[in-house]
Image: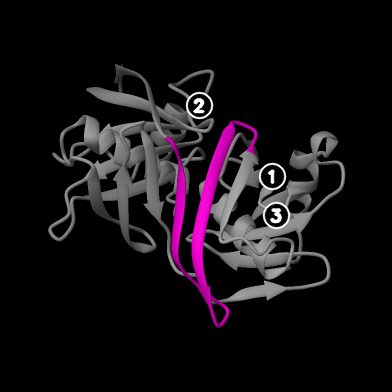
Amino acid sequence: MQIEFYKYQGTGNDFVMIDNRQAIFPKENIQLIAHLCDRRFGIGGDGLILLENDPETDFKMVYYNSDGNPSSMCGNGGRCLVAFAKKLNVIDDNATFIATDGLHHASVADNGIVSLQMINVDEVKITPDYVFMNTGSPHHIQLVEDLENYNVKENGASIRYGELYGKQGSNINFVKKIDETTFSLRTYERGVEDETLACGTGATAVAIAMNVLGETKANSIDLNVEGGKLVVSFDKKDGQFTNVFLKGPAEFVFKGTIEI
């Protein structure tokens, strides 16, 4: 069977997109999904996303990591899916959709920037060495000095597979402060099991963590990721973070068909 796919990227986080509103994709086939995400033998991507029908919202997001397994929320993937939905004329400039972590609202600006509302964050674990929270996916955040030369894959894997997070693991973010409103980060993503050029839920977690740690007082924070720039904004009251938005580009790369 031939299937049509689209390729999208958001600050270097790239995804295989499939319109599955007719429910024809064999979504239980982990090996197939991993093959499609393979950069040498398949299409290539940090993950695969299905756009499906939902009775109460504009669409449903079904996300798989590049290892073929269903995963938790992907912020940049969600933003790319909104751009994909607009291309398919499923939405105009505004959307509501359901994902594994609940309901999301999003909008597409005239310049192509997609703004995605993330889940509220009301629980942040602070230790002397790191911060941990769930922004739709679990994230470990720690400040490092020489971020440019830091071995993200080796150190990230060590923490991800270490005793701290057990079998489930966590995404690992390494951060450097640039100025009062700007931070650079590099992320090791579980499921990809490597550094990725960007991570939306990771950027969200870093912005909140830097505010919690007192590294910034801003509620709109610029994040330099390896694949570009993201912006995270939020409201903060009594230790709770609401109206959390992840903003950045989401771009169509190419489309094609592949035999499965």
Q: Position of residue 106 (x, y in %)?
A: 32, 50
Answer left or right for 260 relative to 15. Answer: left
Q: Which one is earlier in the sequence, the residue at label 3 or at label 2?
A: 2
Mark 3 vs mark 1: which is more N-terminal?
3
Amino acid type, mark 2: Asp
Q: Residue at 52% of width from left, 52% of height from top?
A: 232
Q: Is residue 204 magenta?
A: no
Q: CA distance from mark 3 to mark 1?
A: 17 Å
Q: Residues within 10 Å of mark 3 (few under 14, many from 20)?
A: many
Query: Which numbered tag is attached to residue 38?
Result: 2
- Which three-letter amino acid code belongs to the residue tagged 1? Leu
Q: Secondary structure at mark 2?
A: loop
Position in image of residue 97 (x %, y %) = 26, 54
Amino acid under disc 3? Arg
Per the image, is 227 magenta? yes
Q: Which residue is mark 1?
A: 185
The residue located at (49%, 19%) in the rendering is 41
Main SS of the magenta part reads strand
Secondary structure under badge 3? helix
Q: Which residue is mark 3?
A: 160
Which of the two labelled residues, at mark 2 and mark 1, occupies the earlier sequence position?
2
Left or right: where 240 falls relative to 92: right
Instruction: Give the percent coordinates (x, y) of residue 85.
Output: 24, 38
For the record, the magenta segment spans 225-249
Q: Nearer the viewer, residue 184 or 103?
A: 184
Query: Residue 30: x and y, percent?
Result: 41, 41
